[in-house]
Image (tube, rainbow, N blue to C red):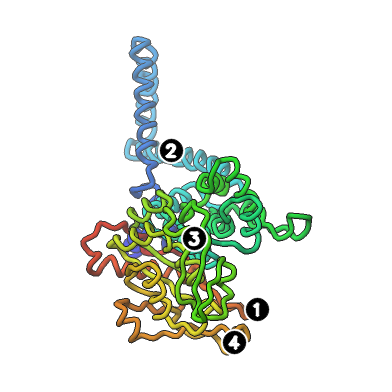
Amino acid sequence: MSIGLFRRAVRNLRRGSSTLPSQDGKYSSLRRIFQWLSPGIFVKRWLFTIYIGVLMTILGLAIWLKLTPIFWLFQLVDRMIEFLARVIPNYLSGPIVLACGLFLVFWGHSRSLGEISKVLRPDGGETLLDMLWHNRRLNRGPKIVAIGGGTGLSTLLRGLKLYSANLTAIVTVADDGGSSGRLRRDFGVLPPGDIRNCIAALADEEKLLTELFQYRFEAGDGLMGHSFGNLFLTAMSEITGDLERAVVASSKVLAIRGRVLPATLTDVTLWAQLANGSTIQGESTIGKSESQIVEIGCSPANPPALPAAIAAIKEADYIIMGPGSLYTSVISNLLVPEIAQAIAARQVPRIYVCNIMTQPGETTGYTVADHIESIDRACGHKLFDAVLVQKIPPSTDCLQYYSEENSYPVLLDRDDIKQLGRSIFSVNVMEEDPTTRYLRHNPRRLAKALIHFYRRAQESAPYRSLKVAPIARDVKSA
C-alpha cells in the first residue's frame, strides 16, 4: 500500500466516509482494521475492559487456589517454549507464535461480531462496523429544526436524515381536508396526515412498516380514503391522551431518525381575508382561494406552542422553513407566536426554501420577494437570513403542463430580495418526472444544498464565534 493511498485512507476516515480507496477489494480487510482502530465508535474501550476482566478473573482464581494450578500451567508452558526453542530458532518460532495469536484474536472477533450482525441485520445488509460508523456520523450531525407541513416537509426530511440524526420536524396541525379532516370532525383529534408523512419519511429503512403506515384504503364503508397511519395515530391519541404522546409511540414503532412534533396541541382553524373583501375559513378552502390573500390568521388566536417544539428551536444549530404551501404549511406554524419569537431570537443559520412553482389561488403571481414579505407580515419578525431558490427553469413540457393548472415558476426578483435584507442561495434542487411531467424538490439534492449552506454559514460572521455542531464532510449516498 503506497504512502499516498494510506494518506487518502486516513483523510477519508477523518471525514467520516464509509468507504476507503480500494483496488478490486484488495484493501477491504485493511479498511475495516482502520475503522475498528479509529476513535469515536465506542467499541475498543469495552473490548479492553473485557480483556482486563479476563485477566482479573484468572488472577482471582489463582489467589483463591493458592497458585497451585497456575504454577503447573506455567511450568508446562515453559517446557513447551523451551522445546520449541531447541527445535526451531527463536527468530522464527517467536514471529510464528505471535502471528498465530494475532490471527486467532482477529478471527474470533470478526466471527463473533459477524454473528451479531446477522442477528441485527438478517437480510445481509450493513455489517456491524458499518452500522456503528453510520450511527456515529449521524449522531455527530447538527441539531436541525425543519418547520412546515404537507409533502414539502416530508421531502426535505428524507434528504436531511442522511446527514444528521438530530432532526426535529415541527409540523402544522391546521389541515382540515381529506382523511385528516374527516378524522378531525368525527373524533375531535388533531389532524394526523402531515405528521404521518413526516414519520414515514424519517423511518430508518423499515420498508414494510412504512408502506403499512402509508397504506390508503380504497374500499369499505367509512374506511375509503383513510390511510392506516392516520387511523393508527388517531387510535394512539385516544389511548395516550394527546397527539404528542401518540407521535412518540408511533416513532418508536417505525424506529425513526429524529423527532416529529406538532406546532401546538390546540385545535386551530385557519382563516384568510382576501383582496375582494371576503373572508374564508379552513386550510383546504384557503388553498383554493380565487382572490389574493391579504391577511391570514387562526382561531383561536395566539395558540400556545408545544413546549418540546420551543425547546428544540432554542437548542437548534440550524433552522429551515419550507418548502411547502406558503400560507397553509409554512405560515400556519408561525401563527403560533411563541414559535415565531423563538426563531427570531436564535442567532444560528436560518433559511427559507422557496417553492419552485406558484400555487393556483394561494400564491398566483407571487415572486420570491412576495413569499418573503408574506412571512414577515404574518409573524412580524425577520425569521431567516437567506432564501434557497431553484436555479434552472423547468423544461418546456413541464411549463406547458403546469400552465394548464394556472401554475408558473416563482420569479426570482433579486433586487427586491436584497432590499428585504436576505441573501440568495440559488441551486438546482429540482427533479422532473418525464412521464407525469410533475415537478418536485429532489430530497438528496435539496438536503445536500442546505448542508452546503450550513457549512458556509459556519465559516462566516455572525456565526463564526458560535459553537455549532460539526458535520460530516461527505455522504456517499447523497
Up/down of 432 relative to 47, above or below: below
| Three-letter amino acid code at the position of disc 2 | Val
Q: Which quarter of the figure has residue 3?
A: bottom left
Locate the N terminus by quadrant: bottom left
| Three-letter amino acid code at the position of disc 4 | Ser
Q: CA distance from mark 3 to mark 4?
A: 34 Å
Q: Which quarter of the figure has residue 437?
A: bottom right
Q: Earlier in the sequence, mark 1 or mark 3?
A: 3
Callout 3 secondary element: strand
Q: Earlier in the sequence, mark 1 or mark 4?
A: 4
Q: Earlier in the sequence, mark 2 or mark 1?
A: 2
Is there a contact, CB below 8 Å, between mark 1 and mark 3?
no
Q: Which is in the foreground here, disc 2 or disc 4?
A: 4
Q: Position of residue 217 (x, y in %)?
A: 72, 57
| Three-letter amino acid code at the position of disc 1 | Thr
Residue drawn at x 59%, y 62% is 176
226 left or right of 354 in image: right
Residue linked to disc 4: 403
137 left or right of 192 in image: left
Is there a contact, CB below 8 Å, between mark 2 and mark 4?
no
Residue linked to disc 1: 436
Residue linked to disc 3: 299
